[in-house]
């Protein structure tokens, strides 16, 4: 079951290239993104939310760090032993799939493809939630640097979402890659170094726990943190039922840290070749990073007793402790001195609590932490506690001011804010890509094929929801359903992969390699189903909203695809479209999808003919040939050059089998395509013969119109048998052609006009001499014409008699 399903030779070659693939594309060169470049590109989406994973795990565990750590270890095992093998198997089978929904269509059995409809709906919803989470989180991190902006938190989140949307629409997703690469690389490298310091110092210096409460209370006083979840009683006193309830809640919350994992295979189409090796290695390293950073954060949080602070990352609290104690001047408990000014400030704060609580009740606002927790203390205890917190905050500022610790905090906050901003890009681009794929399948309107439209729609919905949701801990319950469903869909698809897909990869169904690959899918199914069950049981309130929203988007897809909710026929019939129709109106989205697959097939077939030199004989520029073919076959110019892909990337398969069949049927019509081009090439040459033959007609010399036409035809078409080309000319009828066709045929007309004086010198001289009576009417004319770029000689023999009917023409190849 654990045997490698990869061909040994292919695996050895991929391992040989791995050192190069690790750094490929870091400078935006090479054949695509290598392992590190791919990780850095998706780091904004895959790693940014991990900064809040610890907060959510502790929050779900009710403040118990031991429960949060245990839950995270179980999640990590499910990820590394289940999800990772399934995704690596999927990447090997179809690295260009671009997500779980397209994966089902590409390699799954027909009875499983309904999952792609649900997967598209949930992924699009997931993209919207990504914008909300990232913009709110970026705002919360900004509070570390600019705490005075706390009253404008939601407005700032809206501005962040709008800013990234404008950048992506203006630059385009592909041109924005350097932003993700630079930002993700800087964040990843900084996080590895910074968390290394956090892990070491929390292990050796757990006594720094005295700083935690002061930092948390300062954040609450500034309005950055709205609610704190602390341990209410010792873990040994809670019952077994409550323990498992908190354990499962912590698992369901901590899953958010794995939300960006789906982005790695979805971005695989941009990877360097062999793509499956790059994606597989990136999947493994990303899992190690996510698990490692999560364990270190949770361990440090336990050592320093950091509670769950809604609105502020646990990671940043750990950074503050390191900044003061390691990179700053350091603080000892004896350095915390409570001054009279601290006591006066605490006393003034206590006196404002009744008015503050009354104002919040009148306005319907939630109680602050001070009103909720410390207002229950006596006046003396309240003043002592708050005064001590103020003294710690002052000592922290003094310990970092003017030191490397101060710079460290600024860099940490800035990088985390930037990476959270860029994480919106992952949501925008990923959601727009899914919408574009659904449009390609005919399930969404055609305008979604433009990524910028999808980005705009996602922003509009997110902008409405940001003021409603407001907190990360609120939206994480909804967010998790999207990527967990992607885990379920991908794993299930890999397990039930079609036999023909296995054969394409050189794996014989039923063999040990096939069983090993399906076992990878089975492990993913077990892991993802466990995650899904935990999520459904612990986030029941969110399930209803997710199900209704997902169902609404799916119904809209069904309506667009079928042109209504009526049951469609098994086969999709695309109506016959006359050449030059222009904008075509389709009855349903599936018709449009099939016709666009046909258009892509014809466009690629034409490019194949051009690149292989099959059309060089026409001596016409490729743009005129494209214009001719696009008119004849009703091809939208947008499908020119690899369907919008970069020229150095191989073709990405059609999103499902039906569309791939339509594409291949069109692509294999290269002979017919070449023949139709040749027909209009002949039309231009025939037009020249038709218009100019009259100059040499002399019935009195035995040269009637047919005699001259036949001679001209055979001289201009030396490679074609006389009977064939003459029959074609006889069937020719001059007519006015549409401009796109005539622009091609006219070039052939001009070619014939230019070549005729060079080719006809001997026979036209003879005709002239006959007209002057210097030569007899009956004679033989031999002419040698070079063909095949001068590599072959064709001899044309023309016997002319006294009458036009005595004309006889022969053609043969002679040695140069």
Image (cartoon, rainbow, N blue to C red):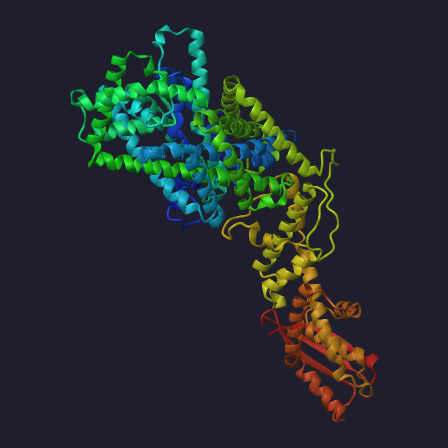
**Above or below, comparing residue 291 to residue 766 in the picture:** above
Note whether residue 458 is visible.
yes
Name the residue at 74% across, 77% down.
Answer: 691
Q: Quadrant of the C terminus?
A: bottom right
- Coordinates of residue 502 in the picture (x, y in percent): 57, 34
Nearest the eye: 692 or 319: 319
- Coordinates of residue 552 in the picture (x, y in percent): 62, 30
Q: Quadrant of residue 61?
A: top left
Name the residue at 37% across, 48% down.
Answer: 27
Left or right: residue 436 compared with residue 682:
left
Nearest the eye: 522 or 154: 154
Nearest the eye: 130 or 378: 378
Nearest the eye: 563 or 2: 563
Left or right: residue 195 compared with residue 159:
left
- Coordinates of residue 238 in the picture (x, y in percent): 39, 7
Name the residue at 49% across, 47% down.
Answer: 169
Left or right: residue 465 compared with residue 418:
right
What is the residue that sits farthest to the left in this orientation? 334
Note whether residue 47 is visible.
no
**Above or below, comparing residue 317 to residue 670 in the picture:** above
- Coordinates of residue 465 in the picture (x, y in percent): 51, 32
**Above or below, comparing residue 669 to residue 755 in the picture:** above
**Above or below, comparing residue 158 to residue 169 in the picture:** above
Q: How many marks?
A: 0
Left or right: residue 148 compared with residue 765:
left
């Amino acid at each position: 079951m654990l045997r490698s399903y990869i061909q040994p030779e292919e695996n050895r070659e991929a391992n040989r290239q791995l050192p190069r693939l690790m750094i490929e594309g870091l400078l935006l060169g090479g054949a695509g993104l290598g392992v590190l470049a791919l990780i850095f590109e998706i780091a904004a989406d895959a790693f940014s939310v991990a900064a809040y994973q610890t907060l959510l795990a502790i929050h779900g565990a009710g403040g118990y760090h031991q429960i949060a750590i245990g839950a995270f270890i179980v999640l990590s095992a499910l990820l590394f032993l289940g999800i990772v093998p399934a995704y690596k198997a999927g990447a090997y089978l179809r690295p260009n799939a671009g997500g779980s929904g397209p994966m089902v269509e590409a390699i799954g059995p027909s009875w499983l493809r309904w999952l792609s409809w649900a997967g598209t709906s949930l992924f699009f919803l997931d993209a919207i939630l990504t914008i909300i989470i990232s913009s709110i989180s970026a705002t919360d991190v900004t509070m570390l640097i600019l705490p005075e902006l706390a009253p404008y938190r939601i407005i700032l989140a809206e501005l962040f979402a709008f800013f990234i949307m404008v950048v992506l629409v203006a630059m385009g997703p592909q041109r924005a890659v350097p932003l993700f690469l630079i930002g993700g690389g800087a964040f990843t490298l900084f996080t590895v170094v910074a968390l290394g310091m956090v892990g070491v110092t929390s292990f050796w210096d757990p006594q720094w726990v005295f700083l935690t409460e002061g930092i948390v209370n300062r954040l609450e006083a500034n309005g950055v943190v709205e609610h704190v979840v602390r341990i209410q009683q010792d873990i040994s006193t809670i019952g077994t039922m409550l323990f498992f309830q908190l354990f499962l809640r912590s698992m369901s919350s901590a899953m958010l840290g794995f939300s960006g994992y789906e982005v790695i295979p979805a971005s695989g189409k941009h990877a360097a070749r062999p793509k499956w090796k790059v994606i597989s290695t990136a999947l493994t390293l990303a899992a190690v990073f996510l698990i490692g950073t999560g364990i270190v954060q949770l361990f440090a949080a336990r050592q320093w007793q950091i509670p769950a602070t809604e609105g502020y990352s646990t990671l940043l609290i750990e950074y503050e402790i390191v900044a003061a104690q390691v990179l700053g001047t350091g603080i000892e408990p004896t350095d915390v001195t409570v001054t009279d000014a601290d006591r006066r400030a605490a006393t003034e704060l206590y006196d404002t609590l009744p008015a503050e609580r009354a104002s919040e009740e009148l306005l319907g606002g939630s109680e602050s932490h001070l009103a909720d927790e410390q207002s229950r203390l006596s006046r003396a205890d309240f003043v002592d506690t708050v005064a001590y917190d103020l003294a710690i905050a002052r000592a922290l500022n003094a310990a970092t001011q003017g030191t490397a610790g101060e710079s460290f905090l600024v860099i940490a906050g800035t990088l985390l804010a930037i990476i959270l901003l860029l994480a919106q890009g992952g949501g925008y681009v990923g959601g727009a890509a899914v919408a574009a794929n659904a449009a390609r399948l005919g399930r969404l309107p055609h305008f979604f094929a433009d990524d910028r439209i999808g980005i705009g729609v996602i922003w509009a919905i997110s902008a409405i929801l940001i003021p409603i949701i407001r907190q990360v801990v609120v939206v994480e319950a909804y967010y998790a359903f999207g990527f967990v469903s992607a885990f379920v869909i991908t794993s299930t698809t890999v397990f039930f992969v079609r036999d023909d897909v296995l054969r394409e990869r050189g794996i014989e169904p039923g063999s040990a390699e096939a069983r090993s690959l399906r076992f990878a899918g089975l492990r993913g199914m077990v892991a993802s189903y466990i995650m899904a069950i935990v999520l459904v049981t612990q986030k029941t309130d969110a399930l209803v909203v997710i199900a209704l929203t997902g169902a609404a988007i799916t119904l809209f897809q069904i309506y667009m695809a079928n042109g209504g909710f009526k049951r469609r026929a098994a086969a999709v019939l695309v109506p016959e479209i006359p050449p030059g129709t222009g904008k075509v109106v389709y009855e349903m989205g599936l018709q449009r999808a099939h016709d666009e697959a046909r258009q892509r097939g014809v466009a690629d077939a034409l490019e194949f003919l051009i690149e292989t030199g099959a059309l060089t004989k026409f001596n016409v520029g490729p743009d005129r040939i494209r214009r001719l073919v696009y008119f004849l076959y009703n091809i939208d110019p947008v499908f020119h050059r690899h369907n919008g892909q970069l020229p150095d990337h191989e073709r990405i398969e059609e999103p499902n089998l039906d569309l791939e069949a339509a594409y291949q049927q069109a692509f294999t019509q290269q002979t017919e395509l070449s023949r139709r081009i040749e027909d209009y090439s002949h039309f231009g040459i025939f037009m020249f013969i038709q218009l100019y033959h009259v100059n040499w007609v002399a019935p009195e010399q035995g040269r009637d119109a047919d005699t001259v036409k036949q001679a001209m035809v055979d001289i201009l078409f030396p490679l074609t048998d006389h009977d064939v080309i003459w029959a074609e000319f006889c069937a020719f009828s001059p007519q006015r052609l549409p401009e796109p066709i005539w622009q091609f045929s006219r070039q052939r007309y001009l070619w014939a006009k230019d070549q005729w004086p060079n080719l006809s010198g001997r026979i036209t001289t003879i005709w002239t001499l006959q007209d002057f009576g210097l030569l007899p009417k009956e004679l033989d004319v031999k002419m040698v014409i070079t063909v095949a770029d001068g590599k072959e000689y064709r001899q044309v023999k023309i016997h002319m008699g006294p009458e036009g009917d005595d004309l006889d023409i022969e053609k043969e190849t002679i040695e140069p």
